[in-house]
Image: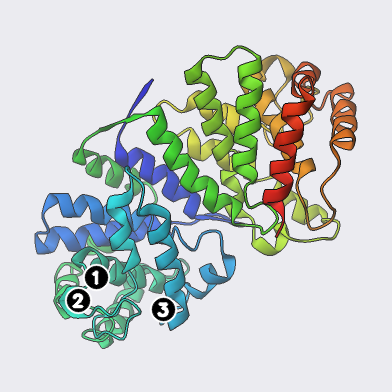
Amino acid sequence: MLFTIHPSNLVSALSTALELSTDGISKHHWRTALIAGRIAQHIGLEESQQQILVYAALLHDIGAVSNWAERRKLQEFKVAQDIYRHAEEGYELLKDSQQLGMLAETIRHHHDHWEGANPSGLAGKDIPITSRIINLADRLEILLKDNVYIFEQRPNVLSAIRELSGQMFDPDLVKALHEFARQESFWLDLINPSYYQDFFRQIDGYGRMVFNMDDVMNIAGIFATIIDRTSSFTGMHSRGVAQVSALLAKARGYSMEEVKLIKIAGLFHDLGKLAIPNELLENPNKLTDKEFSIIKQHPYYTYRILEKIDGFSVVAEWAAFHHETLDGAGYPFRIPEASLRLGSRIVSVADVFVALSENRPYRQPLALAQVQKIMKGMADNRKLDGSVVADLFSDIDTLSSVSEQVVQRSWR
């Protein structure tokens, strides 16, 4: 099976995951990409470099997204030296990816200062041009305030950028910014939420790419790593869910391609957890109603992000409906039994099994017999599909091996 996907469609959807917060979805990466694209057009950057630039801008803070402490530091205009860690982690996440590896070097240097004194040892024009552009675009975006009229902000924003020309920023790029920033339309586009769909249609001109199943699985694996870093107790949770889901799909006679699809769903199923602060995920105490309502957002965002990707409608359902239940009382869509696909039921069973088998801040991993008892009770109460639970425990030897791997991987 091949996925014919606009790269901008895939990257913009994944970029949305980086924008998740407890207050919803922000636009930092999207606005940074728009600013970077305008700078690139103004200076006549060649199209192949523009493509790398815009896609890298859409994912530039990928190394910080699972670390809320670092994300908060990045909200300050003048950042300290300790923010380079996320740029390096972003590079490490992407550098070996056949699909996204071309973005790694740009992301690695996107906080390098023009004047030097960078961990990379680079300075001036030795810093990749795409990184220099993102550095400027990123810091400009951080200066924007949603509660102040945009044209009132313009003089102060440009003044702050100009003061650091030749220090933090490439002076030629600062000059270019000031030239096209005279256009009122530039500033209005930045604050116009409906403009971003036009922006993505424009970058669709970079063309389509054909992704095979393994390509998509590799990208899903990168995001599974990011998702599972949100808590020190879930280091391999998403991969565990993918593994158990595949085991159950094979038991139901799914084709090889369908098994790969459900593995992709397992890898992506907690994508929306990027909206949940680390301290909440690691809270050892009973959650308040407000805290639980924040937790309950995550499958909603998983679905809304994945449904944007070409050909992902089934994957989106399988991945995101893992907290829906046969009695229709699950969340966040309250889907009735008749509308709940088998794939979603499989991922749900896999998620519960892996979660019960893992070390958590409020308890130790549970023994296999105890996990089985709990899951049978959930099936009896129509929270899980009983036939899928029966499939899961039909081969205890294989399941014991999987359970041991989950326990080993979940320890801090």
User: Which quarter of the picture shows residue 188?
Assistant: bottom left
| Residue at numbered disc 1 | 132
Dot 3 or dot 1, earlier in sequence: 3
Task: Using residue 54 as the reference point, say whether residue 407 is left or right of it.
Answer: right
Q: Could you give the CA–CA distance between mark 2 and mark 3, rounded to whole angstroms?
A: 16 Å
Q: Amino acid at mark 1?
A: Arg
Pick the residue in front: 213 or 110. Answer: 213
Q: Amino acid at mark 3?
A: Phe
Q: Are marks 3 and 1 in contact (CB under 8 Å)?
A: no
What percent of the width, then of the height, locates residue 34?
29, 56
| Residue at numbered disc 3 | 77
- Count residues near mark 1 (Cα–Cα under 10 Å), then give few for <14, some for 14-19, many for 20+: many
- Count residues near mark 3 (Cα–Cα under 10 Å), then give few for <14, some for 14-19, many for 20+: some
| Residue at numbered disc 2 | 174
Taking the spot 79% from the left edge, 30% from the top edge, the residue there is 329
What percent of the width, then of the height, locates residue 395?
76, 22
What percent of the width, then of the height, locates residue 279?
70, 64
The secondary element bearing badge 1 is classed as helix
What percent of the width, then of the height, locates residue 364?
84, 52
Color style of the picture: rainbow
Q: Are marks 2 and 1 in contact (CB under 8 Å)?
A: no
Q: Could you give the CA–CA distance between mark 3 and mark 1, rounded to whole angstroms?
A: 16 Å
Dot 2 or dot 3, earlier in sequence: 3
Q: Amino acid at mark 2?
A: Val
Q: Could you give the CA–CA distance between mark 2 and mark 1, rounded to whole angstroms?
A: 10 Å
The secondary element bearing badge 2 is classed as helix
User: Which quarter of the picture shows residue 3?
Assistant: top left
